[in-house]
Image: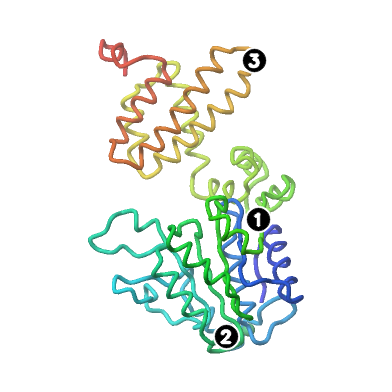
Amino acid sequence: MRTEFSPWQQRAYEQAVVALEAGRLGHGLLICGPKGLGKRAVAEHLAQYVLCTARVGHQPCGKCRGCLLYLSRSQRENLELRPDKSLAHPHGHPTHPDVIFLGHAWRMSPSPARQLTQIVVDQVRVLSERLAKTPQYGEALVTIIDPAEAMNESASNALLKTLEEPVPGRYLWLISAQPASLSATIRSRCQKLEFKLPPMDEALAWLVSSGHSSKDAEEALGAARGHPGLADEWLRDGGMALRKSVASDLEKLERGDIGVIETAQRWASDEHADLRLSHAADLVLAQAGTAGLTDPARLHKLATWFDAANRTRDLLGTTVRGDLAIVDLLLAWRGVDRTRAAKGDRA
Ligand SMILES: [Zn+2]
């Protein structure tokens, strides 16, 4: 079976398979590195490899009963905790009984929103019970927790117990883009499989082989600070076009060619408000880099605005009206205050 891994995914996969074959792959594995580099895909393929009963080289065969069962599950399917505390697949699809994916808890009703962002202790308990049982098909049982940093404190404590009692053939993989936010004890109990940003030329070659022109690839990779996954995403879903329109808006606002309020309303009008602010902050940071020492006043303005843009991004997740928060931000960009705006400046 062929995989279409990027070179950095392939390297991570090989590293894990070689360790596994040499009997060096421990019970706990922390798969970490920046978001968008394909950690989950590697973990999933690795799980199939571990559960395959007729491996071919370093690949799962794709034909044995284990592989067929594994592949029959729906993509990215997490085993979820139901309000009655049973675990179930959200769509009722059959799956391989010896693999468990654990993600965010289901909304329990009446639901505080925060539960959506957490992995809770009951989920971990069920997972641990399952890990203690005998595998149904082969000799291995794999559990994947993604994103591991979503575990709350009690979930994390419960997991620690499981990590401390390793059983041969049982694998507990934690996927995290923010490994530093996991408890130090958990990190110390896990081997690490680390994803890193690839060298620039490799990232560029991969983007071009994914169908982007080298000009677009280079531009997007620069904007994404060398992150090929992000560059690819921006090129595919319009993120680069959004970035260019934000850059143009900022220029026009500074010149007074467009109004603050109409622009703020446009920026806040859809689900891309956060990405617009993120691009805006990033573009301004790049400008600050060029302003450098030649124009300290401008550098100060840019740096202050960069912080304000990030604070506004935080506000978007709250009950504050997004368009109003963005109006304030854009007024600051134009260098006018609300009083002047109220006196008839085009705002
Ligand atoms: Zn197989």
Callout 1 amino acid: Phe
Q: Which residue is mark 3?
A: 293
Residue 220 % position (x, y): 60, 41
Q: Residue at x 34, y 15 (%)?
A: 337
Task: Identify the disc placed on residue 21.
Answer: none
Residue at 37 percent across and 71 percent down: it is 81
Q: Which residue is mark 1?
A: 195
Amino acid type indicated by mark 2: Gly
Please tell me how many numbered marks the rendered image carries.
3
Quarter of the figure with residue 117: bottom left
Q: Is 244 rendered above or below residue 112? A: above
Which badge, 1 or 2, is on the more N-terminal residue?
A: 2
Q: CA distance from mark 2 to mark 3?
A: 62 Å
Residue matched to label 2: 66
Callout 3 amino acid: Leu
Secondary structure of residue under mark 3: loop
Q: Toward the viewer: 35 or 117?
A: 117
| Mark positioned earlier in the residue sequence (2 or 3) | 2
Alpha carbon separation for disc pair 1 and 3: 36 Å
Q: Quadrant of residue 40?
A: bottom right
Q: Look at the numbered disc 1 and give the secondary structure of its residue.
A: loop
Q: Is residue 293 placed above or below 36 in the rendered structure?
A: above
In the image, is the residue at mark 2 within 8 Å of ligand 1 by its beta carbon?
A: yes
- Quadrant containing the C terminus in the rendered view: top left
Q: Tell me the crowding category of disc 1: few under 14, some 14 to 19, or many 20 or more residues within 10 angstroms, Cα based.
A: some
Mark 1–mark 2 distance (CA, rounded to whole Å): 28 Å
- Local SS, label 2: helix
The mark closer to the camera, 1 or 2, is 1
Q: Depth check: 257 or 8 in front?
A: 8
Query: Quick check: marks 1 and 2 in contact, CB under 8 Å?
Result: no
Q: Is 126 rendered above or below residue 272?
A: below
